[in-house]
Image (cartoon, coloured by chain):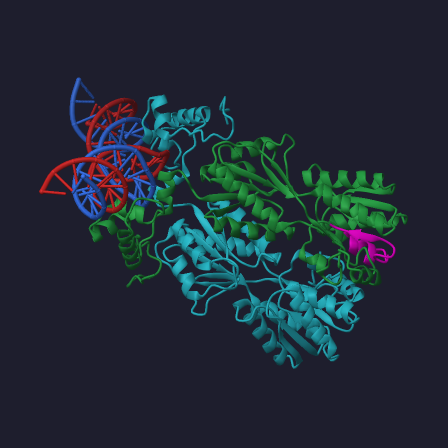
Chain colours: A cyan, B green, C red, D blue
DNA sequence: GACGAGTTTGCATCCGGATGCAATGCCTAT
DNA sequence: ATAGGCATTGCATCCGGATGCAAACTCGTC
């Protein structure tokens, strides 16, 4: 990048345009445009010359102008809400990196109780985003989602809408919840509890239903089915106290890790129970905190990389094709057995015998 | 919003343009444009008619086109990196909400080791963002920052660059670190340790220097000054083990809450020390986790709302004025004394006596 | 009823690239 | 040497709104 002598760094020094550069070089503006567009008809030699001159005069195509003429913004809108659950920031980070690899910049739309949702959705359309990825479990109705994504590529991540008219990618919640139930059964627990998060969200419902169903199939007793009301530490803590108060329960599945950690603290510190001897605890997601030695929480790992990859692939596919066929894409996760359900010795035994229970 | 009959929801159904709407109404395109631009010369009556028609025909000004002609994108780029520290997602959420209130949409630029930084910065310019807010403590040199923000409003949040040629807003790290040292002294501790995070970042340096200086002023002994190398739980844990191994230390200040929590687990669970009896622990930021009963961590609260407000105010100011004068804006935070430095009784006493030590 | 000031509205052009189509150039085959 | 075919390049126009300027209109006044 060449320096712009005498620039104070803040004056709106107008950048050079394609036409100017073209005139300076004695070529046409079209040539300049072509030099920057792969796959266009231009000789290697001229392209080379133009790119060199561009470098020299610090020319850069104006993205806004090309958006206007191509009707492609190369922007993906990411609709987000639960940033306080660390699972999401990390997912978003990976997603935006991958999107960028395929040429899409990410525009974040924070949807929260505080914000004006209508306005956000309008912005989504005004900015002409080519694609929309919705990560927010909450708030948005199927109807507004359909309106906001109308005419553009769209993928829902970790949520669905009842009529399945939009493509979704998610962790296989049913597989996960069943795996946890199976695991509780395998370690000899028979009186189990379920703690949910945000009611009415698809993830929560799937995890709850699959778990409860499997528990029944295995002949275990469901001692509690509590709705935390939200995916928070506090809700988990409260539920933990409730479960622990009743004595009988020997295993609890919390619909996500944050809840589980709240429950863990309640059961262990709040009530003085031993984990996992008195009560086994499992979460869902595999956020970083679950690996803290303090918790070493058994959880079901969401296949984040696969989710991101699939999401981006679907977006690209939709952008390429004219037709739109909504699909549902559950992706397999992995049960991670840690200390919160197995004592240290048991874990070692299992690991020595070469079985799966991963840790790390 | 009127429905578009017969639309399958995904066809690139071209939206209506200002010219078309104008023709339909028998007015000029300029009138339509003016109807949507406050402060332009147009009669209330015509504006009214046009807005109604716009509603009816589902017309919306194309943001891209107006960006092109006004050379204003109304987009603020937020340059971010440490999303794993929950402090940042919450800050970003508030920031993007406030920016939106003043009419700026947020474009997120994730800068991480994995991503191509150069490309991100180029994108920042290509998309013609009007303003840049840099929250990433790391990675970016002053030079590249200056290049990326050249000619636009720019504010660094919680970081500075040595030559102070860019405006910054941050928590007063010096005040905070001194307050912690004072607090350690007030509760009778005399052998204190410091654990840093990312070396060479301004926040880390300021906290470290201010703390160490104050410790010396108060005649306390600095037993350790450890650089964690990064702001992570693991680094904090490791540092905690190191500090605890040596016995003598009776208070430790970790440069942020995540480090402190790692240290807490190491000292309490890893080494079996009593907190705060054997060793007092303090962090910095006041993330949600510090309020978990398990930790009840004493920390210095960053004035997030004030930081956001000031940042937005400065951005608006820069956008309005032609000249650019970099300023440094440290904002006062608040020491929150919790159980990790004071036993329960002591806390109650203090609270009863009507003194400051806040909780929650 | 005419004139001037002030307000509305429309016209024309611009913002900076993208792209269909025609013009030009180059090489090969006859 | 000449015609046909492909590769390059330039021309003109478009994308959808914004805006300076002039035309048209509204009122109030004398």
- Name the residue: 45% across, 40% down: B127
Q: Going by the image, does B200 lie left or right of A216?
A: right
Residue B20 visible (yes or no): yes
Q: Which residues are magenta?
A: B263-283
Q: Going by the image, does B300 lie left or right of A13?
A: right
Q: Which sits in the foreground, B102 or B197?
A: B102
Query: x%, y% of residue D20?
Result: 30, 33
Quadrant of the snapshot with the C terminus of chain B: bottom right
Establish if A10 lies above or below A86.
above
Establish if A76 lies above or below B163.
below
The stretch drawn in magenta includes residue B280? yes
Query: x%, y% of residue A133?
Result: 47, 55
Establish if B31 lies above or below A327.
above
Q: Quadrant of residue A254?
A: bottom right
The stretch drawn in magenta includes residue B243? no
Q: Which sits in the foreground, A324 or B42?
A: B42
Q: Which sits in the foreground, A145 or B317?
A: B317
Query: x%, y% of residue B248?
Result: 90, 48
Q: Going by the image, does A25 lie left or right of A310?
A: left
Query: x%, y% of residue A106?
Result: 49, 48
Q: Going by the image, does B216 lie left or right of B98?
A: right
């Amino acid at each position: 990048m060449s320096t712009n002598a005498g620039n104070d760094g803040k004056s709106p020094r107008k950048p050079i345009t394609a036409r100017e550069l073209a005139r300076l070089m004695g070529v046409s503006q079209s040539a300049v445009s072509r030099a920057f567009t792969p796959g266009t008809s231009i000789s290697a030699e001229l392209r080379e010359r133009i790119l060199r001159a561009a470098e020299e005069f610090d020319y850069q195509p104006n993205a806004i102008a090309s958006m206007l003429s191509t009707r492609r913004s190369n922007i993906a809108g990411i609709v987000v809400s639960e940033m306080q659950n660390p699972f999401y920031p990390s997912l978003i980070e990976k997603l935006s990196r991958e999107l960028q690899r395929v040429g899409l910049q990410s525009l974040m739309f924070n949807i929260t109780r505080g914000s004006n949702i209508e306005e956000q959705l309008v912005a989504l359309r005004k900015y002409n985003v080519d694609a929309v990825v919705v990560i927010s479990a909450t708030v948005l109705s199927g109807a507004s989602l359909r309106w906001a994504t109308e005419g553009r590529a769209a993928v829902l991540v970790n949520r669905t809408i009842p009529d399945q008219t939009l493509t979704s990618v998610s962790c296989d919640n049913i597989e996960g919840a069943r795996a946890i139930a199976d695991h509780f059964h395998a370690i000899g627990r028979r009186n189990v509890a379920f703690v949910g998060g945000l009611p009415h969200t698809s993830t929560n419902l799937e995890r709850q239903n699959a778990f409860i169903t499997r528990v029944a199939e295995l002949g275990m007793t469901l001692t509690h089915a509590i709705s935390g009301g939200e995916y928070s530490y506090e809700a988990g803590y409260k539920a933990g106290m409730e479960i622990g108060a009743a004595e009988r329960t020997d295993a609890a599945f919390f619909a996500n890790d944050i809840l589980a950690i709240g429950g863990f603290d309640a059961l262990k510190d709040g009530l003085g129970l031993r984990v996992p001897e008195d009560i086994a605890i499992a979460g869902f997601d595999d956020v970083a905190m679950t690996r803290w030695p303090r918790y070493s929480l058994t959880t079901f790992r969401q296949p984040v990389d696969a989710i991101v990859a699939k999401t981006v692939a679907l977006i690209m596919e939709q952008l390429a094709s004219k037709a739109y066929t909504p699909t549902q894409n559950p992706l397999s996760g992995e049960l991670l057995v840690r200390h919160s359900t197995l004592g240290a010795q048991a874990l070692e035994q299992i690991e020595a015998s070469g079985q799966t229970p991963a840790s790390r």
